[in-house]
Image: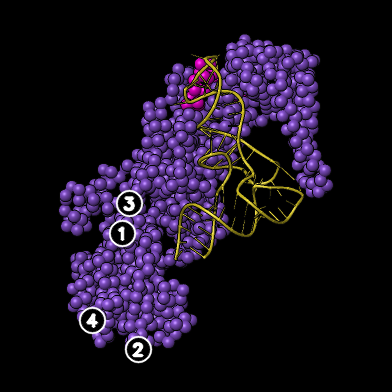
RNA sequence: GGGCGGUUAGCUCAGCGGUAGAGCGACGGUUUUACACGCCGUUGGUCGGGGGUUCGAUCCCCUCACCGCCCA
């Protein structure tokens, strides 16, 4: 006997263990030999992460697909794993070391630190994986991968070396986004633009050789003026036309900087003249390149001003020492003595060297102000780049880094989507993909971190770089290089071969961007660069399921790498996935993005604890409509928990009525109307759910299943079956029991992808009560196929449902007490109706709370009357029914019918409609009109009887 | 500034050429062979505004307004 209520918390771990024991999630589990493959690689969560709502949604959808396809007999692989999250992990471990008051990373050195990271990973790195298991994610956990695994690291090495050899990876000195907190380069995608209230400072720069003439520039970053190497004005800007080609003297510093004409300067912004700091601004960098300006870096790795021993800074300064100025004195005050515009280098160094950006800004403004060179300050709100991990202001910073030629790799990736080899669902995300891919920038892949894949590049004594799979390969290459050039002789070469590279070659300290290894995920996890059976079977994968914010991070990069490295027999590039399903963002119920700082985060595991994993999963699937974010309210989860309970209770009811499974039972052979009807409805539900899932319409699939289970099976089938169970038609009873059990079985399979736990539990329990053993777990049971649909059964049950509903409605409107049993008289019933009424008599009596059903040619007086088909159902309510109220009710209905008929008549009267409308639409309306007219006549008759 | 999306019942959302549906809520009723996390019934909408295409527009096009996101 099933317990009174379903206890998710008790059942879920047990079911998980059953799946695990059966190896149900193993690649290809349950599939016939030669079955079509279906593969999904999990978007690897960050190893430091813990499950948030986005993960819950993402993985629920993947699991729904994977379980669905597994039941459909495909050879399924859902490849799980995590990525090593360079910055985040290093941060976590360093914080832990600090809390334990251990020596810092730099104190213990790289090797010892990495040991600590691995120790941390062993201890805490499995958190999110365990949380995914609680959700019911049916990944092949035996194949779990980590981007720092030996195998995946080999893939990374090979990709780096190959791309370098192909000229697609190179070293370059460019501006990068520099995170001064972590002291590393980061990608533009890891930079968040934050609106900040700041100011525009207007600085006057004296023009060389034109006494009293200034060019005024506006800046949001005064401290960077120390690195200015030009002033740019628009070539068409007449205000400055005479200055082009002249020089300005950079105040404080005394550098001669050219005034150049460049389109970048916007005449409408600020003063129309803009200071150019090529080493500290991306736009200025471009301007600098166009005009061959020097690039003067005035910041160090921590974004502190660095002037001491800064050769670039100190070159060619000290001009304009004769210039001086002071702010205008206020009315009636002593004039202020002029101060020289230019400070001696030593003074500048003392004041600014080693200072942080905030201090330097204040001081520079003050120094300018003191010289009368601060024209004005204007409040200004502008976007300031922040590191998404560190939260600090990012500096454009001039460094040597490794770059991937993303432009080159993007071309096949663009073509693959344009040609439909990879499809985005919903399609409009392709625009986002195109836009980014078409404007793609070189991808900076080096990071100044320790945790990650160390770049396989070694430098010779003269800085020559050797990229190779191993140190010994690099050494071979180096020896060859230096021998050929004559830098070393054969003796030295031989010595190097014996002694090794140490002391001769130095390995690049940097590691690769985490996303570099994630980009290889769809094939590295399958065993590449080895050619494995998995790679052959499961690449290309079927679909990538992810959020739109990840299109750039992975989708794009996986496409680039997949197409470059994976080729078919003909040597043509193969996409990493055929479909990319982009799902929504989960927000709170007010539509706010969930964030820790807002405190509106809903922990999915708390919801699992409270309502069960099935309820959460069903909620997320049901709300996953394409093209709209999910506003998650707890009440919604509670609602679907109720649905799980409903299912449980339906199963209990079935059990109480001995609806046990009959081996070999064929639902297509049933003869009872009710049984034929539910069989048909189940078939329709199967088609609905299947088609919806095939189209990634998770919401529609969930709705179709929900509607069938609750509104067809529970509300009507079980209710209508009650009188059969209580009756004495033993044959019908037996058939109904078998059908009920079979339908419930169908429901369990249909719901399994959404609610795996409760369905698996009921799958076991229903067999147990039947004294049967299932030959497999539900998770590996074939997906139901659609059977026949029987329209006559549908017509009969629809009639029955209509009759009962109408009677209930009238009773309620007429205020008939719920407990009162009243008689029903069918007037003008034809043979079909009489037969139906006879067949379902006990059901009608029961569900409409009637005492008896009679037939008559004329309606009894003072009855409420319901037109149903050709007949009129009368409820004689002498003394109970309010005749006036009943008349009003009927009149209302007549009016409604007249309106409907009128609407159709208007359409028919329109020759244009008759000429142009589709034939089936005309036919449809003709039928409708006929129905309305007949019904109107009946209702009017009923009305007449009350007169 | 460029792009994408949204605006439908009190709330959350479906529908997307033949004048509207669900869940939740509200209201009223209800211990009937499962289920009060239930059952029965009721209420509730000029489908953001304007214009156009069409025999016909919530649905297609244009435009305006407001909201949200991405990119610069």
**Prevalent SS, magenta region:** helix
Instruction: Please state, as top left, top right, bottom left or bottom right, where the C terminus of chain A lies in the image.
Output: top right
The answer to whether residue A3 is left or right of residue A359 is right
Mark 3 or mark 2, which is nearer to you? 2
Q: Which mark is residue A84?
A: 3
Callout 1 secondary element: loop
Mark 4 or mark 1, which is nearer to you? 4
Who comes first in sequence, dot 1 or dot 3? 3
Residue A543: percent from left, percent from top: 49, 48
Callouts 2 and 1 in the same chain: yes
Q: Nearer the viewer, residue A660 or A56?
A: A56
The residue wearing badge 2 is: A210
Q: Distance between the residues labelled 1 and 3?
A: 22 Å
Q: Residue A337 carries which label?
A: 4
Magenta highlight on residue A648: yes
Letter of the purple chain: A
For the point 41% across and 66% down, the residue is: A442
Please report contact status of discs 3 and 2: CB closer than 8 Å, yes or no: no
Extent of the magenta region: A644-668
Callouts 3 and 4 in the same chain: yes
Q: Distance between the residues labelled 3 and 4?
A: 61 Å
Callouts 3 and 2 in the same chain: yes
The answer to whether residue A633 is left or right of residue A229 is right
């Amino acid at each position: 006997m099933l317990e009174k209520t379903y206890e998710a918390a008790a059942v879920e771990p047990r079911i998980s263990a059953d799946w695990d024991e059966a190896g149900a999630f193993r690649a290809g589990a349950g599939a016939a030999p030669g079955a079509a493959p279906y593969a999904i690689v999990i978007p690897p969560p960050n190893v430091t992460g813990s499950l948030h709502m986005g993960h819950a949604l993402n993985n629920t959808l993947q699991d729904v697909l994977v379980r669905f396809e597994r039941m459909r007999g495909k050879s399924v692989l859902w490849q799980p794993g995590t990525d090593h999250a360079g910055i985040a992990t290093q941060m976590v471990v360093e914080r832990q070391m600090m809390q334990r008051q251990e020596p810092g990373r730099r104190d213990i050195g790289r090797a010892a630190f990495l040991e600590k990271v691995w120790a941390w990973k062993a201890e805490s790195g499995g958190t999110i994986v365990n949380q995914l298991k609680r959700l019911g994610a049916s990944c092949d956990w035996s194949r779990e991968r980590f981007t720092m695994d030996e195998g995946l690291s080999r893939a990374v090495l090979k990709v780096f070396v190959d791309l370098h050899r192909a000229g697609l990876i190179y070293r370059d000195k460019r501006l990068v986004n520099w995170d001064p907190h972590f002291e590393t380069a980061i990608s533009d995608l890891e930079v968040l633009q934050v609106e900040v209230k700041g100011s525009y400072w207007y600085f006057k720069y004296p023009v060389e050789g034109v006494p009293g003439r200034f060019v005024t520039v506006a800046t949001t970053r005064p401290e960077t003026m120390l690195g200015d190497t030009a002033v740019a004005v628009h070539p068409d800007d007449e205000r400055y036309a005479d200055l082009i080609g002249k020089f300005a003297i950079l105040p404080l510093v005394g550098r001669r900087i050219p005034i150049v004409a460049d389109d970048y300067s916007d005449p409408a912004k600020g003063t129309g003249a803009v200071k150019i700091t090529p080493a500290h601004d991306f736009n200025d960098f471009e301007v600098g390149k166009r005009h061959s300006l020097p690039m003067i870096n005035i910041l160090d790795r921590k974004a502190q001003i660095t002037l001491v021993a800064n050769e670039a800074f100190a070159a060619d300064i000290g001009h304009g020492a004769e210039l001086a100025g002071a702010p205008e004195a206020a009315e009636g005050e002593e004039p202020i003595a002029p101060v020289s515009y230019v400070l001696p280098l030593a003074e500048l160094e003392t004041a600014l060297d080693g200072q942080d950006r905030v201090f330097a800004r204040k001081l520079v403004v003050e120094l300018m102000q003191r010289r009368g060179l601060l024209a004005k300050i204007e409040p200004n709100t502008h976007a300031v780049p922040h590191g998404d991990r560190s939260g600090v202001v990012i500096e454009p910073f001039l460094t040597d880094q490794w770059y991937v030629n993303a432009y080159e790799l993007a071309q096949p990736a663009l073509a693959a989507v344009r040609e439909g080899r990879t499809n985005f669902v919903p399609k409009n995300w392709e625009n986002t993909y195109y836009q980014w891919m078409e404007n793609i920038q070189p991808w900076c892949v080096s990071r100044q971190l320790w945790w990650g894949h160390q770049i396989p590049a070694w430098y010779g004594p003269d800085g020559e770089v050797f990229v190779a799979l191993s140190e010994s390969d690099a050494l071979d290459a180096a020896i060859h290089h230096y021998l050929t050039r004559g830098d070393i002789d054969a003796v030295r070469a031989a010595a190097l071969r014996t002694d090794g590279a140490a002391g001769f070659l130095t390995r690049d300290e940097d590691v690769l961007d985490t996303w570099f290894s994630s980009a290889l995920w769809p094939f590295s996890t399958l065993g590449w660069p080895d050619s494995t059976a998995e790679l052959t079977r499961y690449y290309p994968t079927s679909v990538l399921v992810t959020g739109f914010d990840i299109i750039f991070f992975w989708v794009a990069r996986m496409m680039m790498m997949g197409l470059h490295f994976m080729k078919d027999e003909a040597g043509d590039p193969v996409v990493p996935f055929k479909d990319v399903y982009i799902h929504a963002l989960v927000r709170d119920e007010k539509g706010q993005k969930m964030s820790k700082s807002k405190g509106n985060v809903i922990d999915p595991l708390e919801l699992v604890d409270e309502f069960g994993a099935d309820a959460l999963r069903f909620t997320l699937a049901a709300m996953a409509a394409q093209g709209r974010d999910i506003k998650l309210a707890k009440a919604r989860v509670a609602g679907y928990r109720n649905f799980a309970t409903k299912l449980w209770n339906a199963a209990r009811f079935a059990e109480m009525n001995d609806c046990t499974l009959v081996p070999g039972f064929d639902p297509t052979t049933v003869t009872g109307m009710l049984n034929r009807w539910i069989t048909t409805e189940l078939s329709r539900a199967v088609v609905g759910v299947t088609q919806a899932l095939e189209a990634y319409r998770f919401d529609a699939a969930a709705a179709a299943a929900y509607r069938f289970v609750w509104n067809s099976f529970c509300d009507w089938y079980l209710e209508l079956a009650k009188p059969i169970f209580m009756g004495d038609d033993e044959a019908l009873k037996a058939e109904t029991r078998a059908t009920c059990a079979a339908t419930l079985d169908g429901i369990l399979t249909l719901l399994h992808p959404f609610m795996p736990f409760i369905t698996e539990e009921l799958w076991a329990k229903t067999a147990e009560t039947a004294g049967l053993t299932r030959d497999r777990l539900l998770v590996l049971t074939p997906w139901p196929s659609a059977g026949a649909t029987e329209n006559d059964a549908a017509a009969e049950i629809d009639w029955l449902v209509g009759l009962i509903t109408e009677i209930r409605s009238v009773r309620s409107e007429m205020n008939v007490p719920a407990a009162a049993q009243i008689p029903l008289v069918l007037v003008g019933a034809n043979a079909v109706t009489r037969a139906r009424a006879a067949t379902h008599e006990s059901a009608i009596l029961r569900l409409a709370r009637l005492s008896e059903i009679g037939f008559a040619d004329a309606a009894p007086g003072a009855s409420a009357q319901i037109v149903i088909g050709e007949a009129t159902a009368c409820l004689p309510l002498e003394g109970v029914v309010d005749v006036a109220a009943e008349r009003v009710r009927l009149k209302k209905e007549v009016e409604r019918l007249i309106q409907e008929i009128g609407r159709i008549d208007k359409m028919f009267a329109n020759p244009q409609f008759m000429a142009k409308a589709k034939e089936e639409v005309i036919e449809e309306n003709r039928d409708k009109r006929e129905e309305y007219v007949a019904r109107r006549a009946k209702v009017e008759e009923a009305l007449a009887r009350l007169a």
